[in-house]
Image (tube, helix red, strand yellow):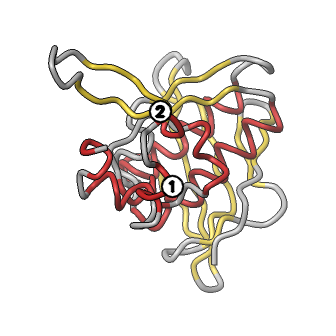
Amino acid sequence: MISVVKLFMKSGQMFVRGPTVTKPERDIERVYANPVGDFQRDAMLYCQEKWGEKPLSMDARGMSDGTLRFFAILTALLTRPRRSQIIIEEVDNGLHPSRSQLLLNTLRDLGREREIDVLVTTHNPSLLDELGPEMVPFVIIAHRHETKGYSQLTLLEDVKGLPKLMSYGKIGKISSEGKLEEA
């Protein structure tokens, strides 16, 4: 079961508040950073998980690339000024596909709460499949001009025959099958 991530910063540390983030591995109870190095100017990220009766702590060196990327995205969203914009290239790189919905919910919820416009790119059909129909007006596809070869951007809702395309399945499915390019 996955619940919504609620994090807050206090004294330079990031903490989980409200429900914990439940993942197939374990429940993350606390994420924090401590100063390290000769001059205490660098920081080491730590994660504390519930593991049976005892908490298990690990530093960033023991975390997966996907976990570190997820925490980096959360940190960026929590530290951006309100009413600003953030652009995240290949937002889901390194993340397990089962985390797609958690990632999208987190981006949507924190973006809305902090009034941050969130722009992301992906090539991942699994992440695209997690987008509901309410997101169609916000999806832009990049494709090559058919005669001149340069890249161009088109709103998904402006694609000819979109309702028929969507009858074939979710956005990720029609994208991975090349149906968007054929339209």
Residue lying furthest bottom in this view? 52
Left or right: 119 as drawn, with respect to 13: left
| Residue labelled with disc 2 | 140
Rendered residue at 42%/46% (across/down): 92
Left or right: 59 as drawn, with respect to 183: right
Percent of width and height locating residue 7: 75, 47
Q: Is residue 29 above or below residue 162?
A: below
Name the residue nearer the viewer: 62 or 154.
154
Type of amino acid under label 1:
Pro
**Pointers 2 and 1 in contact (C-beta within 8 Å):** no
Left or right: 128 as drawn, with respect to 82: left
Percent of width and height locating residue 133: 61, 55
Rendered residue at 80%/28% (across/down): 115
10 Å crowding of disc 1: few (<14), some (14-19), many (20+): few
Q: Quadrant of the C terminus?
A: top left
| Residue labelled with disc 1 | 163
Q: Secondary structure at mark 1?
A: helix
Percent of width and height locating residue 30: 68, 56
Rendered residue at 79%/37% (across/down): 112
Q: Secondary structure at mark 2?
A: strand
Name the residue nearer the viewer: 162 or 101.
162
Q: Is residue 110 above or below residue 130?
A: above
Residue 172 location, quadrant: bottom left
10 Å crowding of disc 2: few (<14), some (14-19), many (20+): some
